[in-house]
Image (tube, grey):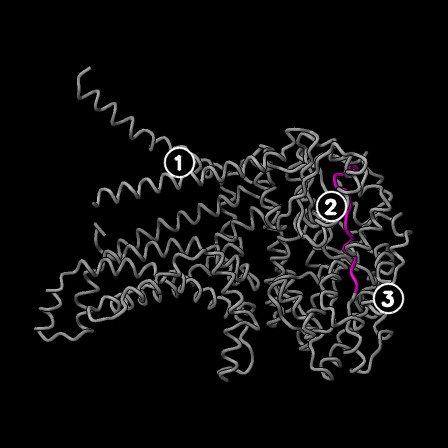
Amino acid sequence: MNIRAKANIVSWSFISIAVIMICVFYFYPMIQALIMSFQSGMGTNLSFVGLDNYKRLFTDTTFIAALKNTFIYLIVQVPIMIILALFISVLLNDKNLKLKGFFRTAIFLPAVTSLVAYSVIFKYLFGPDGLINTMLLKLHLINAPIEWITDPFWAKITIIIAITWRWTGYNMIFYLSALQNIDSSIYEAARIDGASSFRQFTSITVPLLKPIILFTSITSTIGTLQLFDEVMNITKGGPGNSTMTLSQYIYNLSFKYTPDFGYAATVSYAIVILIVIFSILQFKLAGDKNG
Amino acid sequence: MKKMLGLLLACALVLGACSSNGGTNSAGEGGNGGDGGDASKITIWAWDPNFNIKAMNLAKETYAADHPDVEIEIIENAQNDIVQKLNTGLSSGTTKGLPNIVLIEDYRAQSFLQAYPDMFHPLTDSFKAEDFAEYKLGPTSVGDTRYGLPFDSGVTGLYVRTDYLEQAGYTVDDMQDITWDQYIEIGKAVKEKTGKDWLSLDPNDLGILRVMIQSAGSWYLKEDGKTADLADNAALKEAFETYKKMMDANIVKIHSDWSQYVANYNSGDAASVPTGNWFTPSITAAADQAGKWAIVPLPKLTNNADSVHASSLGGSSWYVLNVPGKEAAAEFLGATLGSNVDLYQKLVTDIGAIGTYKPASEGEAYKAPNEFFGGQVIVQDFAKWTAEIPNVNYGMHTYAIEDILVVEMQNYLNGKAIDQVLADAQKQADSQIK
């Protein structure tokens, strides 16, 4: 055996550990879940039902409601968060800003808190007698407490506020790091040409950040489609199913109702399909192959 | 320098991974202790430290006196966690980490028993079924085989603030054996005179609907426990209408979780609670309200001839899993909660837990007056109502259907016609449950 072949074996054996691990812990469960998504039944008594589960998705009102909710979160929350994160990151990138480190840490801090812990705190902040209602009442901005958690409309708002608070700082960090890579001479040239700050933002910052904006909007979209902790802890999907998300529906199918793991697997594959479609869509919209 | 830092970071990561591994390992071993590797140890899972856990601890003490060699470990978990752990454990096909004895809510029992048919140990020979309240036997059995040892009674009553009643010109006598319509009328008067809400409800939890329909011997499902019974269910229809009347009368305070629920009563913001007897400790927690509460029979549906002044809410039973050590576990249950009258007396005096073991109600503890409730003999009353609870088959899908109804209830409150509401719910339920 020559040296090259030996080196090959050695290097492949290094890689093989990772490959085997990924196969066992990622691909095997994925394939098992796919097989399971064609089965249905109670608990361990699963039997093959062909495409019945997938057909059931289209007539399942809870699934459709959860899908609708997820889209509302997506359409309302993701743009708000991205724009907010972009705005804050530009502000914090200002060379003349004092206490920069403090502000950055403060805005990023929510991203390191536990999902469950912050959800529980939000639940109490927005409770009928919670801090938010008390404050608004004391300031005479409202006459009666807002039903932040028990009204179908306000419950959605509460969830959107919560996830925006939690994830804006996280996205901001990406923008900040990208902003530092933009050569300051470009801005200088723009200033000499008489471009306003707003013009600089729209004509320099945004185009140069495009790959990062694309990346954050894809991760945020995926995150929204998988939204679970906040909804589970703040509203439990209620009132009714007005804040129910797909992930929570999967949980309910597996653990709250008589378990039907087969159908639950089908719903999770529906999420997979959606994520793939959205990611392709976003790449196409951004019109840039290397994203 | 950078390389050093990188190396340090890598080390930290690896070490971190190791230590967390160690953590899970030891936790795993702790859990494994309960899988019955040695048959003399019995592991028990239950929720609610003030009620079920305390009750099991009493049973353990009683049993330990005669059986010093048996080790019993009682582990407290939230109910949701137990349901989740059981589902994952039972469906994975391995019994590792599962307990010997587990507490399961009656509404969910059939779903477990039928989804995992071989995983439960029959208790038919461990206790005398006829000694227990009849309505507990349906949910805990499959055919003639008993799988669950009936435990706490979910028997309902109507807790009411007597001082608010008097301010509104009523007495406790006016509350005896009334209908839900009368209940709402009195509520309006109380709200008008005292400004206090009449009751506190969670729009996501239709417990009060379940209470109403069971009082008429009806349920979300037909007798077979599998077919949804919504569209032509007269009791359910009236319960929906009654619920809307309550909401329209503006006498309901809304809560969204248990702590707000209890707080609404402890703070004196709401005046009556139609609920299960397990709510007593939450009421008596507000010591300053001593003497201001009474418990009257549950109101019944106004236009339903079958409806009685007794129903059930919650309530759970003990199950033995089919894992090594099952015989010892079954023997333990049979010797304690299955037959020990003295233990049931202690349950009442020490924690106010009312069982469903009939011979126990002859004991002294069941006849003691409760000073908090103005000297009312509440245990005796509850025991009396327990015997009147109509027996229904909770079936497999209580919570799946309830989630459908919660949505339809919102539609109904927003003006959708009742027959359409129930027809739509029926359609959804038929397509969802199989």
Badge 2: residue crowd in 10 Å (few <14, some 14–19, many ≥20): many
Say yes or no: labels 1 and 2 on the same chain.
Answer: no
Pick the front one: B46 or B179: B46
Q: Name the amino acid type tagged 1.
A: Phe
Quadrant for the N terminus of chain A, please. Answer: top left
Question: x, y (%) of residue B328?
Answer: 74, 32
The x and y percentages for residue A50 are 50, 38
Provide the residue designation for mark 2.
B56
Image quadrant where residue A130 sits: bottom right
Q: Which residue is denoted by mark 1 in the rendering?
A: A27
Q: Secondary structure at mark 2?
A: helix
Q: Is residue A55 left or right of residue B390?
A: left
Above or below, B302 against A273 in this view is below
Q: Which residues are magenta?
A: B142-157
Chain under callout 3: B
Residue placed furthest toward the top: A1
From mark 3 to mark 2, how far is it between C-alphas?
A: 27 Å
Who's the residue at 75% across and 59% down the image?
A: B276
Confirm whether the magenta stretch covers residue B154.
Answer: yes
Mark 2 residue type: Met
Residue B350, position as x, y percentages in the image? 79, 54
Taking the image as shown, residue A20 lies to the left or right of residue A162, namely: left
Return the mark for residue B149. Answer: none
Query: In this rendering, would A75 be left or right of A288?
Result: right
A35 part of magenta stretch: no
Residue in the picture at 81% in, 72% down: B291
Return the residue at label 3. B376
Q: Chain of mark 2?
A: B
Nearer to the camera, B390 or B280:
B280
